[in-house]
């Protein structure tokens, strides 16, 4: 029995000695390409036919992703208000609508922008299990691919200006106060 344990320990030591290997160079991930598609429409009246034309324009410009559509509306304040109303009825979020250069003219200009992310092609994952390096690259690539496809504005992946950096000391204040809190029962 002791011989069997010694053989197992020698085999274990031999297998563990080969575990440390030099680092394997990994290629940097391919960049996510972002394309901006912009369409422009001029709204000339509040008639039903113009409202229908606006709704059709917004539907086509959104490419099925109304949540990713960004609108910049300028011109007549009455027509702009109607354009905003129609856009909100279609489910376009108010945060994605901007009004600029409002005046008492006869037309309104609606600029609809959609950002499309084209993530890199990921290697296929099929057949026998490859080595760990290939596995990490495949899963990392699919994660980047899914994230790029899901976001409304892929430019946020490269630097979101809406979220400002915060002060870490201020965030740590509650933890510091909690650690300093004592329940000294002898002082009662």
Image (cartoon, helix red, strand yellow):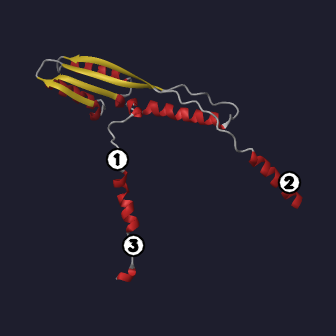
Q: CA distance from mark 1 to mark 2?
A: 58 Å
| Image position, residue 126 (x, y; %) | 65, 30
Identify which residue is drawn at 52% across, 35% down.
Answer: 143
Q: CA distance from mark 1 to mark 3?
A: 29 Å
Callout 2 environment at 10 Å: few (<14), some (14 to 19), or many (20+)?
few
Residues at circles 2 and 3 in contact by the CB criterion of under 8 Å: no
Q: Is residue 2 visible?
A: yes
- On screen, 16 above or below 110? below
Residue 38, disc: none
Residue furthest to the front in view is 22
Q: Mark 1 = which residue? A: 166
Residue furthest to the left in view is 104
Quadrant position of the N terminus in the picture = bottom right
Q: Mark 1 or mark 3, which has the lower sequence index? A: 1
SS at mark 1 in the image? loop
Callout 3 environment at 10 Å: few (<14), some (14 to 19), or many (20+)?
few
Identify which residue is drawn at 56% across, 28% down.
Answer: 122
Q: Mark 3 = which residue? A: 182
Identify which residue is drawn at 60% across, 27% down.
Answer: 123
Q: Quadrant of residue 51?
A: top left
Q: Quadrant of residue 23?
A: top right
| Image position, residue 177 (x, y; %) | 36, 64
Q: Mark 2 = which residue? A: 7
Which is nearer the eye, 32 or 82?
32
Q: Mark 2 or mark 3, which has the lower sequence index? A: 2
């Amino acid at each position: 029995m002791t011989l069997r344990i010694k053989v197992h320990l020698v085999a274990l030591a031999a297998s563990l000695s080969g575990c440390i290997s030099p680092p394997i160079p990994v290629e940097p991930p391919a960049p996510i390409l972002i394309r901006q598609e912009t369409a422009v429409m001029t709204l000339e009246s509040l008639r039903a036919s113009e409202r229908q034309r606006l709704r059709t324009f917004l539907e086509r410009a959104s490419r099925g992703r109304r949540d990713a559509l960004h609108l910049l509306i300028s011109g007549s304040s009455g027509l702009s208000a109607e354009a905003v109303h129609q856009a909100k009825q279609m489910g376009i979020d108010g945060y994605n609508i901007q009004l600029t250069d409002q005046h008492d003219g006869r037309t309104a200009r609606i600029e609809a922008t959609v950002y499309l992310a084209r993530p890199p092609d990921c290697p296929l994952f099929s057949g026998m299990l490859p080595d760990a390096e290939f596995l990490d690259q495949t899963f990392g690539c699919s994660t980047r691919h899914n994230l790029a496809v899901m976001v409304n504005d892929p430019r946020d992946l490269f630097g979101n200006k809406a979220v400002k950096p915060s002060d870490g000391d201020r965030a740590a204040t509650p933890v510091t106060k909690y650690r300093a809190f004592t329940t000294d029962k002898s002082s009662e």
